[in-house]
Amino acid sequence: MKNPDANSAWAKDRDHVLHPYTDFTTFKEEGSQVIEGAKGMYVTDTEGRRLLDGIAGLWCVNVGHGRREMADAISEQVLKMQYYNPFGHSSNVPAAELGYWLASHAPGNLNHVYYTTGGSTANDAAIRLVHYYFTMKGQHRKKKIISRNDAYHGATYVAAELTGIQATKNSFDKVGEHFINHVSAANMYAKPDDMSEDAYCDFLVAEFENRIQQLGPDNCAAFIAEPIMGAGGVLVAPKGYHRRMWEVCKRHDMLYIADEVVTAFGRLGEWFASEALFDYQPDILVSAKGVTSGYIPLGITMISDEIYEVISRPQCEGGVFSMGLTYFGHPVACTAALKNIEIIENEGLLQNARDVGAHFQQTAQALKELPIVGDVRGYGLMMAVDLVADKATKASFPVTTGMGGKVFKKCVESGVIVRPVGDRIVLSPPIIINKEECDTIVSTLESAIGNEC
Ligand code: PLP
């Protein structure tokens, strides 16, 4: 046992906190690593270890930990006006200012924002808005959503059903089977070696088109996709994929939802990735995480002028748009977002993410030389390293090997936090990172993996 003192935070956490995505059998023995301090690129745990944060908390602490400016802005807003009813004709200044900034910077005419409490709730809101939109247009059957295998869209019931990672669904009931479908992920590592990138893209687009025909175009309302799939494996799609999927959507009067919960606010060197990097304009854009760098929870669901025009029409029965959260447009969360955006702008962090991200991707390619590294891929400050038992066949290790967990433990012993997702190591450091810190992450990972070869 790590810390037998029943009064320690470690014991209280182990006995009373229901941790997400956790194997309770080992958790009851080992508990968790309790983090009690965080500054810049580093966190410290209750055992006094100082660790380089290679995952920005959980893809979110873009401007780094423990920033005085963030604390000051948040506390000033708390003292000025910490909360008031956001329903109907009542609002607050930070929500309005953030809405204006988002409309000015989001792709195309995504000029309207619905605020939520995180990524899952923002995706749920997106689906409700899609359904509401087609109902208001009188297209009552056009309600089916197409998502992708291996996608991650969250943990509330609808977001969990949009998610395509099978392991997250075990033992939970389904509520959205009748309207949520999945097509293949765009997985360049898993594609047959003798298939070209273009041919693979053709295959994925044809599969999508066929699925729409099967379901009936009049029944298909929207497609949802992350610009780069995050938790599903940092999968960068073949060239032209998103643009072509978007074109298919347009042909069938379907909406394209970009889930930019991870990819926005600098992780890929842009405010938003969909248009800037992948050349398509989503009808709905969802984000969270980096919007406040995780200082306060906030989610955003942005919709186009066309959708707004339809959903703001008077309802026949004289009803109102009845969808609202108590913490919609929370003034403290919106203040945190505005200060976070100001920091990203003033410190040139988008450019830093581009420069350092390119260095990170290039340096990490060296890991491919290791006998158990199957693939190293990513873009900007998003990366995955796949650990495999056999490089030639890409065969996985038996689950009991726990290779990802072993590499994670070795990295932590050497002072760096990485994230094991099965036998895949995922990296997403704060976007304030410099090249030397990237080199430290890569060399630590190299030794940790080398140790297991
Ligand atoms: N969408 C994507 C792409 C995500 O990566 C996540 C979380 O990791 C979510 C949605 C869910 O966000 P949250 O955990 O804030 O509800």
Image (cartoon, rainbow, N blue to C red):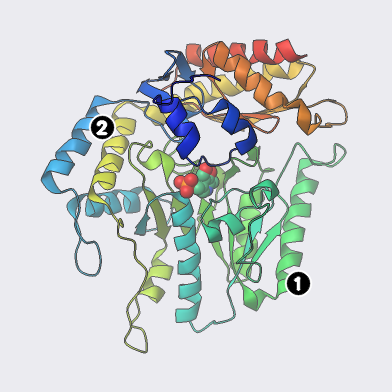
**Residue name at image x 50 percent, y 41 percent:** 263
The local secondary structure at tag 2 comes to helix
The amino acid marked with disc number 1 is: Gln
The amino acid marked with disc number 2 is: Met
Is residue 186 visible in this depiction of the protein?
A: yes
**Where, by quadrant of the figure, is residue 453 drawn?**
top right
Question: Residue 6: which disc?
Answer: none
Q: Is residue 250 above or below residue 336?
A: below
Q: Choose the circle earlier in sequence order: 2 or 1.
A: 2
Work out which residue is located at the far bottom of the displayed protein and give it: 317
The local secondary structure at tag 1 comes to helix
Work out which residue is located at the far left of the displayed protein and give it: 80
For disc 2, the neighbor class at 10 Å (few under 14, some 14 to 19, many from 20) is: many
Question: Where residue 196 sits in the image (x, y, percent)?
Answer: 81, 41
In the rendered image, which quarter contains the N terminus?
top right
- Is 201 positioned to the left or the right of 257 in the image? right
Question: Where residue 172 sits in the image (x, y, percent)?
Answer: 63, 57
State whether label 2 is within 8 Å of ligand 1.
no
Q: Pointer 2: what residue? A: 70
Q: Pointer 1: what residue? A: 214
